[in-house]
Amino acid sequence: MEQTLYTALGGADVVAALARAWHARVLADPVVSHAFSHGFHPAHEERLAAYLGEVLGGPATFTGGARPLGTESQVVRDHSGNGEHPEMDDRAIACWQAALVDVGVPEDAVLHARLRDWFAWATRVQMAAYPRSAEDVPDGLARPTWTWDGPPAT
């Protein structure tokens, strides 16, 4: 079995640290922090870590288990209806790349490239697909799993 991106970056502890580091960076950013200005779930970092782990090939702790935390449609809805915001997206991606370094993700150029590519895709494609209204997001969206080869086939 091929190593997943989740395993390569260090598993659950590193994913949790990455969620915390990215969240701290975006809250400190004068542009990206606007996305959180109306508040956020009190367990945002834990939920984010579960989502990150799952989409990077780790256990299904976000959508699975006895008490799922959410669905892909819910995640996309949470990021929809805010118009287009390329500067905010660029800054969120930069915060992600800095957070990878902050938490000591192994210095593997391919790993960093895949993680950067995933976050950019998730930000600019998956989460940006419905800029007009969260009501446009259909139920039943599939949760993508990103691999060493990039995005899932559509």
Image (tube, grey):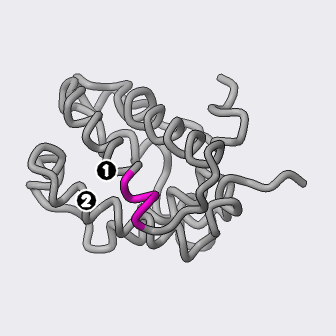
Task: Give the x, y percent position of residue 7.
Answer: 70, 63
Residue 37, quarter of picture: bottom left
Helix or strand or loop: what does disc 1 sit on?
A: helix
Q: Distance between the residues labelled 1 and 2?
A: 6 Å
Asked whether residue 101 is drawn in magenta, I would say yes
Left or right of 33, for residue 129: right
Secondary element under disc 2, as helix, strand or loop, is helix
* Pointer 1 or 2: first along the chain: 2
- Give the position of the C terminus as an image quadrant: top right
Q: Which quadrant of the view contains residue 101?
A: bottom left
Residue annotated with mark 2 = 25
Q: Mark 1 points at which residue?
A: 95
Q: Taking 52 as reference, is 112 above or below it?
A: above
Q: Residue at x 29, y 62 (%)?
A: 23
Q: Which residue is drawn at 22% across and 24% down?
A: 84
Q: In which quarter of the image is the N terminus?
A: bottom right
Classify 100 as above or below 110.
Answer: below
Residue placed furthest toward the bottom:
13
Estimate the x, y position of residue 89 in percent, counting from the top left: 28, 35
- Span highlighted in magenta in the image: 98-102
Residue 115: horizontal and vertical position, in percent? 55, 46
Residue placed most toward the observer, 103 or 85: 103
Q: Classify mark 2: residues with Cα within 10 Å, few (<14), some (14-19) or many (20+).
A: many
